[in-house]
Image (tube, rainbow, N blue to C red):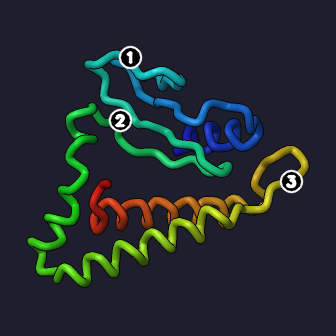
Amino acid sequence: MKARWIVLTLLLATPAFAAEMYSWTDANGVKHFSDSPPPKAVKAQKLRVKGGVTTSAPAEDEKAAADQNAGPAMAAAAGYAPADIKRNCDIAKQNLTSLEGQKPAVDADGYPVDLDAAKAHQAQIEKANQQIKLFCTAH
């Protein structure tokens, strides 16, 4: 968790930094960060930077990324009506747009003024992204 905050701090302090990074731990327990994907056999986290906020997700191969309609199918299987799936998709997209427009306050050096608020904001963005993945189809 500490390494995640270090990466977040570095990314906030350097706005020209790469928009995508990868994080993984090797067999010796050493944590690595790179702007290029790790070797294929390595399980990594993909770190995304947008609007000064870093989110992480497991790095996906192209085949897994192609199946982006699985979420709505799962929602339907869980008993959600098509109208509810669409409504929840619309709400999740609105929430993400709103959250992306709100940036946590930073000091003169680019560090968050309130780390707890920045962490809560990041958690809200991750939740909105999860809801979009569940309720929205890819087009």
- Residue in the foreground of this view, choosing between 21 and 96: 96
Three-letter code for the amino acid on which mark 3 is drawn: Asp
| Secondary structure beneath label 2 | loop
| Front of the two marks 2 and 3 | 2
Q: Quadrant of residue 65?
A: top left
Q: Which mark is residue 107?
A: 3
- Residue 122 on image: x %, y %: 56, 59
Q: Quadrant of the C terminus?
A: bottom left
Would you name the residue on which mark 1 appears? Answer: 28
At x 65%, y 60%, the residue is 118
How far is mark 2 from mark 1, CA to CA?
20 Å
Residue at image mark 2: 59
The quadrant holding residue 104 is bottom right
- In the rendered structure, which disc, 2 or 1, sits on the residue that comes first in sequence? 1
Q: Residue at x 38, y 16 (%)?
A: 28
Give whichever of discs 3 and 1 has the lower sequence position: 1
Q: Nearer the viewer, mark 3 or mark 1?
A: 3
Q: CA distance from mark 3 to mark 1?
A: 37 Å
Amino acid under disc 1: Asn
Residue 131's spot in the image, x, y percent? 35, 67
Whole-percent x, y for residue 133 in the image: 32, 59
Dot placed on the residue nearer the N-terminal end, 2 or 3: 2
Q: Amino acid at mark 2?
A: Ala
- Badge 3 marks a residue whose secondary structure is loop
